[in-house]
Image (cartoon, rainbow, N blue to C red):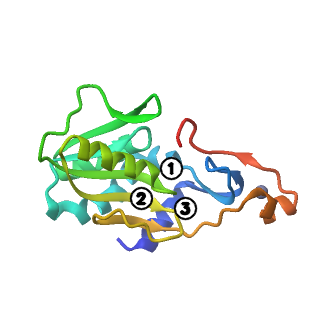
Amino acid sequence: MSENKFKKLLIESGAVLDGHFLLTSGLHSPTYVEKFQLLKYPKLTDKICKGIADHFKNTSPSVVLGAATGGIPISQSVGRELSNRSIFAERVDGQLTLKRGFKIEQGEKVLIVDDVVTTGGSIYELMDLVKNNDGIIMGIGVIIDRSGKKIDFGVDYHPLVKMDIPAYESENCPLCQDGIELTSRGRTGKK
Ligand SMILES: [Zn+2]
């Protein structure tokens, strides 16, 4: 499936919202990606996640790792397609941690997945988690990269859709200047 086709599915699912949003970073943006509008459709999620699985199939990862909460259904879906294990990390005192008996074995091949990359912060944390467990990172697959730049994680990084979404400091925000009401959306409890 082409990048445009993935993008069309995301827009049709209602995951790409137009408005005036206060992001977790403190910046203002005319676009917000509400990934759960996509993830609420499991079959559509599978269809999109197959794009990630197909890209990394040849690297034969034995475990797929995501971060709670959006990374859980994505990790499950990619893991289902690759017929391997699917685990997730969750925040304990602000730090992504493996709980629930989840393990990465020494030398194990790990595929990292995530929903939306804005600054890449969660991805770097997942990479540290794999390295601290002596796992091997086979790549990083995400649904949307909204960073607007080329992030180099030092491994094969494959976003299905790249969106160059503007974000403004409040004092330079054209939406503020137009007096459009600001909506607070975003991930709470995340850096
Ligand atoms: Zn604004």
Label 3, label 1: how far apart the Cα atoms are: 11 Å
Q: Earlier in the sequence, mark 3 or mark 2?
A: 3
108 shown above or below 160: above
Q: Residue at x 41, y 58 (%)?
A: 143
| Side (left or right) of 175 relative to 123 | right
Q: Earlier in the sequence, mark 3 or mark 1?
A: 3
- The residue tagged 3 is 11
Relative image position of residue 28 (x, y in whole percent)? 70, 56
Q: Is mark 3 within 8 Å of ligand 1?
A: no
Q: Nearer the viewer, mark 3 or mark 2?
A: 2
Q: Residues within 10 Å of mark 2 (few under 14, many from 20)?
A: many
Q: Residues within 10 Å of mark 3 (few under 14, many from 20)?
A: some
Relative image position of residue 191 (x, y in whole percent)? 53, 43
The kind of secondary structure element at disc 3 is: helix
Relative image position of residue 157 (x, y in whole percent)? 33, 64
The label number, if any, that marks residue 143 in the structure image: 2
The kind of secondary structure element at disc 2 is: strand
Q: Amino acid at mark 2?
A: Ile
Q: Residue at x 55, y 61 (%)?
A: 11
Q: Residue at x 31, y 58 (%)?
A: 140
Q: Amino acid at mark 1?
A: Lys
The kind of secondary structure element at disc 1 is: loop
